[in-house]
Each structure stands twice: as structure tokens, then as C-alpha cells.
Image (tube, rainbow, N blue to C red):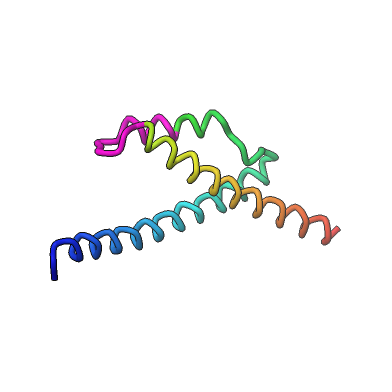
Amino acid sequence: MNPLDEWRDKIDDIDLQLVKLLNERAHCAEEIGKIKLELGLDAYSPQREEEVMHNVTVGNPGPLSSYAIRRLFERIIDESRAVERILMIQRATSSKKKK
């Protein structure tokens, strides 16, 4: 196997790990969505999102820049918020049907 293929295989493995972790994160967002619904809170929490951004940029050792990490996490947070909102809408809709 040549070095290029070895590095590509390593990236493929990392990509699968990222998918697993992103889905694990989405599961956490679902659980948070359930709690927010019970508490009557909105899915959007700007203070918490800024806290996440701070954590990931401060904890970034590189070589990705803080700007790049921030852009990636903006997308991750958007998708996590979408997961929360979908769950919240489904729960609210099923709750109304029961009444």
C-alpha cells in the first residue's frame, strides 16, 4: 500500500468516528430537546451556543484555525438545533392529539 492510500484509509476511519460522534451528539440534543419542552424553553439558546464556541476554540490545538473550528461548529450546532426542534414539534403535536 502506498503512503497516499494509507493516509486516505486513516481519513476514512476518522470520518466514521466523526459520524458516530456527531450522531451521539445529536442524541444528546434530542434529550435536551425533551427537557427544554418540559421546561417551556426554546431550542435556540444563544448564550449556550456562545459557550460551546468558546470551549471549542479555546480547546483547539490546530492545525485548523479557530475561525475554521467556529464555522464547523456553527453548522454542527445548526443541525443539533434542528434535531431538537423536530423532536419538540413531534412531542407537542402528539400531546395535542391526546387531548
> Does the magenta segment cover residue 64?
yes
Residue located 39% across and 55% down the image: 21
Q: Where is residue 85 in the image (x, y as percent from the top left)?
A: 65, 48
Quarter location, residue 56: top left
Q: Position of residue 65 (x, y in %)?
A: 31, 33
Residue located 57% across and 53% down the image: 30
Q: Position of residue 99 (x, y in %)?
A: 86, 58
In the picture as drawn, the residue positioned furthest to the left comes out as 2
Q: Horizontal placement of 78 versus 90: left or right?
A: left
Along the line of sight, the residue nearer the viewer: 88 or 13: 13
Q: Horizontal placement of 44 versus 91: left or right?
A: left
Residue located 55% across and 43% down the image: 78
Up the image or down, 72 lies above or below 47; here it is below
Q: Horizontal placement of 87 versus 25: left or right?
A: right
Callout count: 0
Up the image or down, 2 lies above or below 38; here it is below
> Does the magenta segment cover residue 3?
no
Q: Position of residue 49 (x, y in %)?
A: 51, 34
Along the line of sight, the residue nearer the viewer: 84 or 63: 63
Q: Quadrant of the N terminus?
A: bottom left
In the picture as drawn, the residue positioned furthest to the bottom comes out as 1
The boundaries of the magenta stretch are 52-66
